[in-house]
């Protein structure tokens, strides 16, 4: 099983995947806001990312049914910077 996480500009989505069967066991999502200033710059609040990740993960795992995690691996498709 894999936990797929997508943290985008409007929210975070999480999937619990059964790779042996090729099925989605559970899904969760939670929104976060985009902060704009008068100069047109865009930022996001890291705490909102973390809160959204926690909520979306909790919902996806609940939908899939609880199971013990035996491994954890993380990867990113491109560079991201987070200042906290």
Image (tube, rainbow, N blue to C red):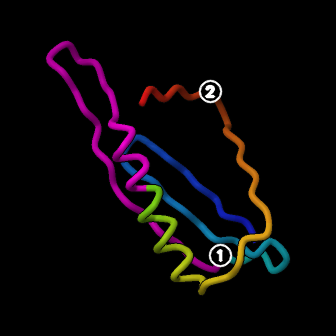
Q: Up-down: is 22 above or below 12?
A: below
16 with respect to 40 (left or right): right
Residues marked 1 and 2 touching at CB (< 8 Å): no
Q: Residues within 10 Å of mark 1 (few under 14, many from 20)?
A: some
Answer left or right for 38 relative to 65.
Answer: left
Residue at point 71% right, 43% down? Answer: 75
Q: Quadrant of residue 71?
A: bottom right
Residue found at x 28% / y 43%: 33
Whether residue 9 is situated above or below residue 42 in the rendered picture: below
User: Residue 83, percent across and down?
Assistant: 44, 26
Q: Nearer the viewer, residue 74 or 4?
A: 74
User: Is 8 one of the magenta-colored residues?
Assistant: no
Q: Residue furthest right?
A: 20
SS for dot 1 = strand
Whole-percent x, y for residue 42 in the image: 31, 25
Dot in front, 1 or 2: 2
Q: Which residues are magenta?
A: 24-52
**What residue do we see at 57% from left, 77% from top?**
26
Viewed as shown, does residue 40 lie left or right of 66?
left
**Of callouts 1 and 2, the N-terminal one:** 1
The circle drawn on residue 79 is 2
Q: Which residue is mark 1?
A: 24
Q: Residue at x 64, y 71 (%)?
A: 16
Give x and y (percent) for residue 1: 76, 72
Q: Quadrant of the C terminus?
A: top left
Q: Secondary structure at mark 2?
A: loop
Q: Position of residue 45 (x, y in %)?
A: 33, 37
Query: Can you tell which quarter of the image residue 25 is in?
Result: bottom right
Residue 15 marker: none
Query: Magenta includes 25?
Result: yes
- How much space separates mark 1 and mark 2, taking CA atoms? 27 Å
């Amino acid at each position: 099983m894999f936990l797929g996480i997508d943290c985008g500009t409007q929210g975070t989505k999480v999937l619990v995947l059964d790779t042996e069967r090729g099925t989605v066991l559970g899904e969760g999502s939670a929104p976060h806001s985009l902060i704009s200033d008068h100069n047109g710059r865009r930022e996001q609040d890291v705490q909102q990312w973390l809160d959204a990740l926690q909520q979306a993960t909790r919902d996806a795992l609940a939908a899939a049914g609880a199971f013990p995690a035996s491994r954890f691996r993380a990867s990113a498709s491109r560079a991201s910077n987070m200042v906290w």
